[in-house]
Amino acid sequence: MKKVKITVMKKVSHDDLIEKYENPIEHACDLQEGMVFYAEGFEKPEGFCESAWTSVAPFVMALSCGAENFYDGWMKNRKSAMISCNDGFRPVSFLLETEE
């Protein structure tokens, strides 16, 4: 299996949606832009958000196994994917890249 580099590219906060719909929570996310993780297959990297992992894991697994060119040329780098976590209030975007 190939290693996949996971880079936290962007973290957004939809404060209007949080104020209107979310119950107050003390702590939501430890990920910061620029953080880098490495994964192989379905093994979640240490320190990576469990919820975000459910969103990126299928793409990490596919890239680890050699898949490329998702969605008919969506990415400039055929061996990569841009995936966001499933938090509608604070989505985090991740760049997944196969390590050669």
Image: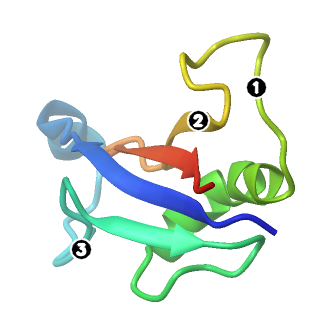
**In the current view of this chain or complex, which residue is farthest to the bottom?**
46
Q: Which residue is mark 3?
A: 30
Q: Nearer the viewer, residue 90 or 19?
A: 90
Taking the image as drawn, is residue 34 in sight? yes
Measured Cα–Cα span from mark 2 to mark 3: 22 Å
Sort mark 1 into few (<14), some (14-19) or many (20+) by Cα contacts within 10 Å: some
For image coordinates 34% across by 65% down, the residue present is: 36
Nearer the observer: mark 1 or 3; the answer is 1
Q: Quick one: label 2 or label 3, which is nearer the N terminus?
A: 3
For image coordinates 26% across by 64% down, the residue present is: 35
Residue 94 is marked as none
Q: Nearer the viewer, residue 92 or 18?
A: 92
Label 3: which secondary element: loop
Residue 70 is marked as 1
Q: Which residue is mark 2?
A: 81
Compared to residue 49, the image places residue 94 above or below, namely above
Q: Quick one: label 1 or label 2, which is nearer the N terminus?
A: 1
Label 1: which secondary element: loop
* Residue 56, quarter of picture: bottom right
Q: Amino acid at mark 3?
A: Asp
* Residue 89, quarter of picture: top left
Residue 16: x, y in percent?
15, 32
Sort mark 3 into few (<14), some (14-19) or many (20+) by Cα contacts within 10 Å: few
Measured Cα–Cα span from mark 1 to mark 2: 7 Å
